[in-house]
Image: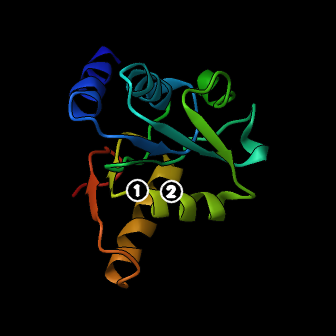
Amino acid sequence: MELFKVLAYVFYVKRKIDLVYGGGSVGLMGLISKTVNDGGCHVLGQLPPFTRGICSSIVLTLKFGVLGGYGTMEELRYISGETFGEVRTVSDMHERKAAMAREADAFVALPGGYGTMEELLEMITWSQLGIHKKTVRNHSSTLKN
């Protein structure tokens, strides 16, 4: 996890890149959002009300976007404890993806689960359909580039 903290600092903080993501606060995304926020960059979480206090391993979308990232099974039970930066409540998962897609300049997938894979594939599909012209990169073990 220390490697991801260093990468978040180098990739986001040093380059002054803001983070838009699913709003979780544990595991990989919790670490990245805290590092980016502590470094003075804007952090925006998109969190449906039903995810407060339950499990998920959803995509992150950064201002230079990121998708994915979860911790242990125990951590997955609680994704929205302490949040960092601004958190907006969205009505459901569909609105969450649309909101993250609107706010992000690009998308990067980090290690995650089925939710990460689904969100990554949706961003790729939207690109293929011409819905957006943003960069999509996969750095997850879920799917190979």
Q: Assess whether mark 2 and mark 1 are in contact (beta carbons under 8 angstroms).
A: yes
Q: Which residue is mark 1?
A: 104
Q: Residues within 10 Å of mark 2 (few under 14, many from 20)?
A: many
The image shows residue 92, relative to residue 141, as above or below, that is: below
Q: Which residue is mark 2?
A: 100
Residue drawn where x is 39% and y is 21% of the image? 35
The residue nearer to you, when weighing 106 against 39, is 39
**Which SS class for mark 2?**
helix
At label 1, the amino acid type is Ala
Give how far apart the Cα atoms at labels 1 and 2 are: 6 Å
135 relative to 101 in the view: left or right: left
- Rendered image quadrant of residue 132: bottom left
Residue 15: horizontal and vertical position, in percent? Answer: 21, 35
Residue drawn where x is 73% and y is 35% of the image? 54
**Which SS class for mark 1?**
loop
At label 2, the amino acid type is Met
